[in-house]
Amino acid sequence: MKTFPASILLIFAFSTFAAKADRSPNLILEENSHLFSFHIPPKWFYSEKLTKKAGVPLLVVPSLETANPYRANIYVNVACSKKCGVPGDHAIGAMLDKSKRRHSKLKTNPLPSVTTESGLSAQVWLLSDLSYADISQEAIAFIDTNHAVVLAVLSVRSTSTWEADYNSFIKFVSGFKLLDCNSEDSVETC
């Protein structure tokens, strides 16, 4: 799993663009077919500049108005599943196994699943005892869209704000919206 050092997150303070809307930009899941977006929780912000610097499709951080804005981040990535010939559940298991091989002390525990705005079920896992220097714990939501598995990851530096950060993460994941560009009533373009 990717981690983002505090130096990258400091760039957010100098970013000239931060989305104030409650939805992320639409992201392409499959060219000419599907887009997706997330609900951005209150007091969290999307920065286009920071997202590009991190090399992920989407990254949100707590607002600078909070007590410790660099305590956590939520990022999104897309993993293959159907295009690779692997069902979503197998892709999820393979990703968790790969993480366990990289981090020998890693503990993975399932958390309650989350139903998204699109009616999909997101499998959520807690990863603890990570061997990253600046990340103490992560929650990963795996959203199987039947086109790909979308990953949403909450990374926290300290578990002291875990409850608030995890609640924001659940709002983020539950706001996942899959948009079909080919439906007759779609106003979205891929």
Image (tube, rainbow, N blue to C red):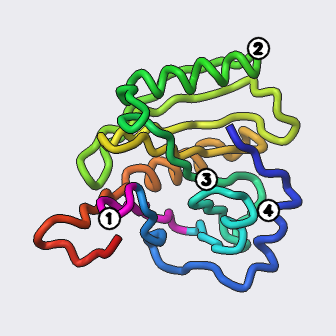
Residue 37: x percent and y percent?
41, 63
- Number of other residues with Cα within 10 Å of mark 3, as a class: few under 14, some 14 to 19, many 20 or more: many
Q: The residue under label 4 is which amino acid type?
A: Leu
Location of residue 8 in the rendering, given as x and y in whole percent from the top left corner: 82, 61
Callout 2–callout 4 Cβ contact below 8 Å:
no
Real-space Cα separation, disc 3 to disc 2, in angstroms: 24 Å
The residue to which callout 3 is attached is 74
At label 2, which amino acid type do we have? Ser
Give the spatial CA distance, label 1 vs label 4: 33 Å
Callout 3 amino acid? Ile
Disc 1 to disc 2, C-alpha distance: 41 Å
Say whether disc 1 or disc 2 marks the residue closer to the N-terminus: 1
Q: Earlier in the sequence, mark 3 or mark 4?
A: 4
Question: Who comes first in sequence, dot 2 or dot 4?
Answer: 4
Quarter holding the N terminus is top right
- Label 4, residues with CA under 10 Å away: few <14, some 14-19, many ≥20: many
How far separated are the C-alphas under marks 1 and 3?
27 Å
Location of mark 2 (residue): 104
Q: Which span of residues is magenta-colored?
A: 30-42
Above or below for 118 versus 84? below
- Residue that mark 1 sits on: 32
